[in-house]
Amino acid sequence: MRDYSYCPMCRSPLIEKKMDGRGRLVCQSCAWVCYKNPLPAVACLVPDKKGGILLVRRAIEPYKGKWCIPGGFVESDETLPEAGRRELREETGLTGTAGRLVGAHVQKSRMYGAVLVVGLEFTVEHEEITAGDDAADARFMPENALPDIPVESHRKLIREYLTSRLQL
């Protein structure tokens, strides 16, 4: 998030003030507070019938050419499951149904600042994949042969997902 100098509500100058144990930019005129919240994103953890996990090879930056979990940013008019279904369809051509929450992690991003990545398990109706949108490739990979996953939050979610499958 960009740093503000003036209030976006009334255009008065902002001052730094200690609130909630943090330094925050606050408007003295209308009391607007600049909260620097992470952007919400969803990551879809999709198993196949053989116990593998669905991964996509990114076609765009960041991490172009690298493998990750399908997913993306949640739009302001979407729920997490809706965003996951949309991203899953756009990146892999698969239609999925959201299930349980796997985990949530804040990931630092050079491009977007802090991103809150929420992992949801998805089940799919079929396993015929068509890479699309911002994915150069997409496939189910066995858990014992996963490639390097450069996105830390995705590595954590995969580890949590695999651990939780053993406990179910």
Image (cartoon, rainbow, N blue to C red):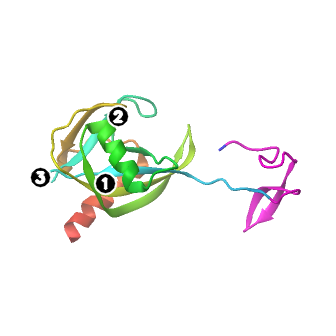
Q: Residue at x 24, y 42 (%)?
A: 94
Check disc 2: other Cα within 10 Å, few if <14, some if 14-19, many if 20+: many
Q: Nearer the viewer, mark 1 or mark 3?
A: 3
Asked if residue 81 is positioned above or below residue 57 in the image, the reply reads below
Q: Secondary structure at mark 1?
A: helix
Q: Residue at x 30, y 31 (%)?
A: 132
Check disc 1: other Cα within 10 Å, few if <14, some if 14-19, many if 20+: many
Asked if the stretch drawn in magenta spans residue 25, the answer is: yes
Q: Point out the stretch of residues depicted in magenta.
A: 2-31
Instruction: Give amino acid for label 2.
Output: Lys
Instruction: Give amino acid for label 3.
Output: Lys
Q: Nearer the viewer, mark 2 or mark 3?
A: 3
**x and y, in percent, of residue 55 in the image:** 27, 42
The residues bearing labels 2 and 1 have C-alpha atoms spaced at a distance of 15 Å
The residue positioned farthest toward the bottom in the image shown: 167
Q: Residue at x 27, y 38 (%)?
A: 92
Looking at the image, tell me whether mark 2 or mark 3 is earlier in sequence order: 3
129 displayed left or right of 26: left
Q: Residue at x 76, y 59 (%)?
A: 23
**Label for residue 49?**
3
**Badge 1 is on which residue?**
158
**Badge 2 is on which residue?**
66
